[in-house]
Amino acid sequence: MLNEETLIAGAIATWSSNLDRANKLFCGLDEAALQKQVAPHRNRLVYLWGHLAATHDRMLQLLGIAERVHPEFDAIFLSSPDRASTLPPVDVMRAWWAEVNRRLDASLRELKSNDWVARHTAVSEEDFATEPLRNRFSILITRTNHLAYHIGQATLATK
Amino acid sequence: MLNEETLIAGAIATWSSNLDRANKLFCGLDEAALQKQVAPHRNRLVYLWGHLAATHDRMLQLLGIAERVHPEFDAIFLSSPDRASTLPPVDVMRAWWAEVNRRLDASLRELKSNDWVARHTAVSEEDFATEPLRNRFSILITRTNHLAYHIGQATLATK
């Protein structure tokens, strides 16, 4: 294995283990359990879950690997805070979460090293010329961190 | 820049930006503010801070890059839960946190690609032969995630 392949495999493994953890946290919860807040007056679990699903949905586009699943939910989970919108039914959220992560998982393993160091779709060729770290790999590792950040919060409500 | 160097630079940049965030969260807090809990009956900020410092202190050894600073604090922040031990004074914690992260920062930038894909010190050569992802790079990205996980929690008490 080339060094670059080993590094990428390590980052994907860390992404996957965080996703496993999120699946265990969220996927078994019923409607009532999803209403719990991570701390008094803070986000509810259902909102955090949707926020993560929307973030991962956006990754499909940022990485240029697949069509988005529910871009219309960005308004609920990315542009608005919790309690500002009517949320989708839990079965819709569950299917959305599964489908987004299925498309990601299938594609992440297909990308080659040169794809990972290439720019993501939200940066222009011009900007990328001077900021080469704005690549697909940075999307993977910063979104893994984003996932860990909210898992840390969600854990507080589910222990 | 070789692909492998770009990937490593991206991971170090993400580590650094999480560390900046932790510095902003913890370093300006006084003794009273550090007593806040992230949620009712959950860890206090001072414990999370020490837990992160101890984790980063252990990284020095796991990466084989420098002597540890306060290994004796593992008993307080890694082996015991919050409220089980008398904690070090805040000025000692502040100096510890700064020194650990200073040693890490200096060393991370010195490591070459071949160093990053080499085993960390807690895995045997025998195990590493069949589990090549147990390398220094995995320590960097999993500990960045660990940092993000607890930053997510600490933010709940400091907003």
Image (tube, coloured by chain):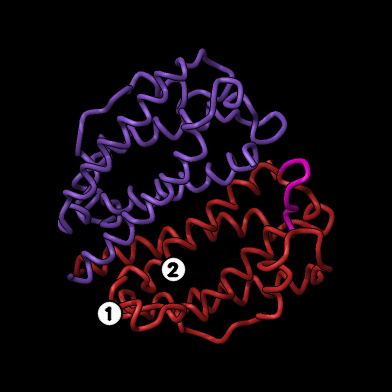
Chain colours: A red, B purple
Quickly name the residue at label 1.
A114
Left or right: B67, with B147 as reference point: left
Q: Residue at x 73, y 52 (%)?
A: A43
Pointer 2 residue: A139
Which chain does tag 2 point to?
A
Q: Quarter of the image containing the N terminus of chain B?
A: bottom left
Indicate which disc, 2 or 1, sits on the residue closer to the N terminus: 1
Q: Which residues are magenta?
A: A39-46
- Badge 1, how many Cα within 10 Å: few under 14, some, many 20+? few
Q: Residue at x 39, y 35 (%)?
A: B55
Task: Tell me what residue is drawn at x 59 percent, y 19 percent.
Answer: B83
Q: Position of residue A54 (x, y in %)?
A: 63, 70
Q: Residue at x 81, y 67 (%)?
A: A85
Q: Amino acid at mark 2?
A: Ile
Horizontal side of residue A93 vs A149, given as left or right: right
From what the image shows, is residue B42 above or below residue A84? above
